Amino acid sequence: MLNRGNAGYFADEEYRVAGAEVSDHQESCNIIFGVKEIAPEYLAHGQTYCFFSHTVKGQSYNMMMLQTIMDRGITLLDYEMVTDEQGRRLIYFGDYAGYAGMVDGLWALGRRLDHEGMNNPFSHIRYATEYTGLSEIREALGVTAAQIRQDGLDARLVPFVCGFTGYGHVSKSAQSLFDILPVETIAASDLESFMRRGKFSNTCVYKVVFSKPDLYEPVQRGDTFDADHFLKEPSAFSCVFERYVPHLTMIVNGIYWEPRFPRLLTKGFMRRWFPSAQNPRLRIIADITCDVDGSIELTVKETNADNPVFVYEPASETIRDGWEGAGPVILAVDKLPTELPLEASKAFGDFLLPWVPTLANIDFTQPLDQLHLPESWGRALIVHNGILAPRYEHLQKFIDKENLK
């Protein structure tokens, strides 16, 4: 059963033709599948929901929703936590967030360089929603690549260095579009020496992918980076990404981040560095991860496709919408996959639909140990009948912190 007028890509009639029932009433449904957070006023007592809740990191802005879910005896499953035995996500939009975030970042770069009066091959790149899909985006980037090879980049933009963070679908898909350009890859450990040598090409762009050992180092001198130690005790590590930032023209952030982790880029660093730097290189931060006040502390708000970017001005620690100002342009669009709606919808449906019959036949009113959820979905059960599942009991401290009782 489909909720009438759900504002998705496909019209109600298309669902009817495909055999779906379209209705305003889902009271009889055993489980309701959404996408993003559901406003508390629409959460029905005792119902089972599955959506991206954005609660598992203790996000303060969703603790009221989580408390409402518990108060109303609701069961909540979260797509983000549906994983295999190796922790790999099985249901995701990440590819399309990466695709849209990359093209939007290059669009923003073109606008910024136009404002600076710099002829550049990124000027013709349009915002993601102005393309029919990925095929047209790839064609446009192919044109950009040809321009770079033939005409070269403005000397003020050389070397053009783009830094990528993250290991997952977001970062990989963003890189796949960037790689259409004439790219030379530099190891993070070689970036500083590369800049010192001063031998650059204006007919290519440079790419640096930062892995965790590049980003974090132990506070204790002499120790080496250990991923397990970092996850267990992140306070024992400091982030060293800021040492690379002065060399970067663009940052594409696709990292997984929690509040207990060190930030990648802080307001304090930007205040110390940017205003005093002579012609700072950094133009664009495409924060695809989009954690407000998160790994990129300059991401002080979410944006949308109607007003996708703002400039963070480090000297005054203020922002202004658009791409004009004394600081880097920040892209922080929260719902990037919706900018490629047809392809993103189809891909997400392909991930989810095989699981629907199994989930629809589960009686979620039964005790937790009698649900017989598939193991991958058991990891995604956040709340069961109003009670936090054992693996998510730690979220209670975040609820208590908000004084919601």
Image: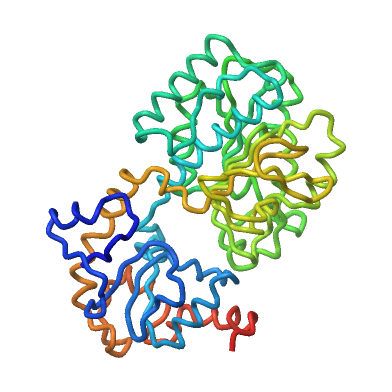
Q: Position of residue 176 (x, y in %)?
A: 44, 34
Above or below, 343 against 76 in this view is above
The quarter holding residue 309 reads top right
Above or below, 102 against 263 in this view is above
**216 to the left or right of 42:** right
Above or below, 402 against 128 in this view is below
Between 179 and 348, the one lying in front of the other is 348
Spot the residue most to the top.
150
Above or below, 85 against 195 in this view is below
- Count of numbered circles on the image: 0
Q: Position of residue 327 (x, y in %)?
A: 75, 39
**15 to the left or right of 381:** left
**368 to the left or right of 198:** left
Residue positioned 66% across, 26% down in the render: 113
**5 to the left or right of 243:** left
Q: Position of residue 316 (x, y in %)?
A: 83, 48
Residue positioned 40% across, 28% down in the render: 138
Q: Quadrant of the C terminus?
A: bottom right
